Image: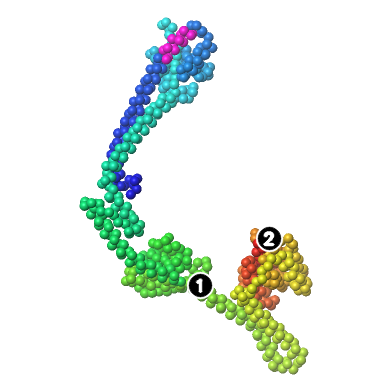
Amino acid sequence: MKFFDLKSIRWRIALPQLGLFLLILLGLLLYLSGFLRGIYLDTLKSRLEAECRLLATETVQMEQSSPSPTAIEQYAQSTGASLGLRFTIIAVNGKVLADSEVDPATMENHLTRPEVQQALSQGLGSNTRKSATTGINTLYVAVPVRSGTQTTGIVRLAVPVANVDAVVARLQTTLSIALGIAALLSLVLSFLAVRSTTQPLEDLTDAARQVSAGNLHVTLLPAGGDETGLLTDAFNTMTEQLRSQLDALRGEREKLSAVLSRMSDGVAILDDQGRVTMLNPTAERIFGQREAQVLGHSAAEVFRHHQLFDLWRECVESGKPNAVTIEIGLEHTFLQAVATPLGKSLPGSTLLLFQDLTRLRRLETVRSDFIANISHELRTPLASLQALSETLQEGALEDSAAGRRFLDQMQKEIDTINQIIRELLELSMIESGKVPLTVQSVQPASLWAGSLVRMQLQAERNGLQLANLCPENLPPVNADAPRIEQVMINLLHNAIKFTPHGGTITVSAEARAGEVVFSIQDTGVGISAEDLPRIFERFYKADRSRSGGGTGLGLAIARHIVETHGGRIWAESTEGMGSTFFFTLPVTA
């Protein structure tokens, strides 16, 4: 038990006694403070009065011997300095003749000051107020200066009240320390008095807290034959029984947890109100939630999909298993969710099983797309071959010139089919990692130089100009030179194919953070915003691309080669204003 736990029995016994004692000490402190302050002020006033009367006599003598204003001012200053007080000499009409701290010429008439009025009327005046001259709260004592029976002026002494308060504060501090020590001693004595009674209860409370925290191996020593001892024996028996039951439950729970944590399917259990009571690691990953953070939350809040909440509700209402297939999240995850009532095993609860079908769905989509694409690409050359063969069978073979032309056309279609198959095999090998890369440190300018030489003739035939703006001082990159040149040739081939006669194709490169960015810019027809995100897909062709032939695999092959090198590839284009293709390669370390 914590020493400063105010709810403990020890404090409940000691605090009332301590509170009463402190109230008495506080009252005594306030009374003594006021009493001492009053005594100190009375003593100070008496001293100042005696000083004033003595100074009044000296002032009369001084005025008779040296009545000049300068002599009076010097007398006031020296007297005030020797006494450590402010000393003022005032004429009967209230004019300040001299002051030990302030120039009298700057001081206003003092005839209306309370202490001056009392001194003139009663022979002694005192007052405590804020000084109009210095702005400090001050105690004033004044007496009249008499020469025979005639009053010739007033002398006044002043001391800041802060000095008085400082003395009183020191007295209060001393008293407070003494009273605090007395209060501490009283508290210690109170605790010692109740310790023998409260200690067994505190030990029992501490043991109960350890049990609630999971420590079931706590055993208390017998505390005697009184009520506390009986309570201790009962506590020991209870913890022993609880330990046996929890050991059995822990074994069953560990078996269940081992199964659930290794399941590839997500599992969640909801209570009769639709609140989550259990979530396995796979379900945590699917929904991006942590079990510890969502326990007790509703299914709608955790799963964030109305169909899953409806599935649970229908299962509860019908009492039978139900299933639904849904798509969730930005990653388009496909789930098959099955809800099953747990019945007597866990009354009111429902088991939700989530099977991730995303990979199967994507594989099915890829398979369907591949079949559709390859069928589309092969349909045209096969249809052309069929038409040519039928024409030859119908008599065109007798015409040697036409037959030769048809055979040449058939050979072109066969070459197209072979090219599709060859590029498909190459793409498949690249994607599967079966194409080994011979990575070396290569200068970017040399990569462009070899590619431009191979494509120069094709560009000239199309009336295009190739411009090489690649700097010679770029850092070397890690690359398989033949494979990267294949990427460049594919990109240059596309640029040549879609750039009208008289256009320009510019290649360049620049170094950025840890990589070199290669670019191919053309002045061609450009790519529409709708087609741009899909140009690197297998067999994908924009409408203009289909009119110009090609397999639609060149950019897909380029993308896989660049990514195999650890780089990135992308395109920027505005329809009708040309295109720019970019790809990156890592700089040699």
Compared with 50, 381 (above or below) is: below
Query: Does dot 1 land on a helix, a strand or a loop?
Result: helix
Q: Nearer the viewer, residue 27 or 276?
A: 27
The rendered magenta stretch, by its main secondary structure, is classed as helix
How far apart in space, not on screen, are marks 2 and 1 (Cα)? 39 Å
- Residue picked out by circle 1: 358
Q: Say whether residue 234 is left or right of residue 131.
A: left
Residue 90 visible at all: yes
Give the mark toward the camera: 2 or 1: 2
The numbered dot on residue 447 is: none
Residue under numbered circle 2: 511
> Which residue shows up at 33% across the image and 33% down it?
179
Can the viewer see residue 538?
Answer: no
Q: Nearer the viewer, residue 28 or 228?
A: 228
Vertical comparison of 59 with 304: above or below: above
Q: Amino acid at mark 1?
A: Thr
Look at the image and give the residue range highlighted in magenta.
51-63
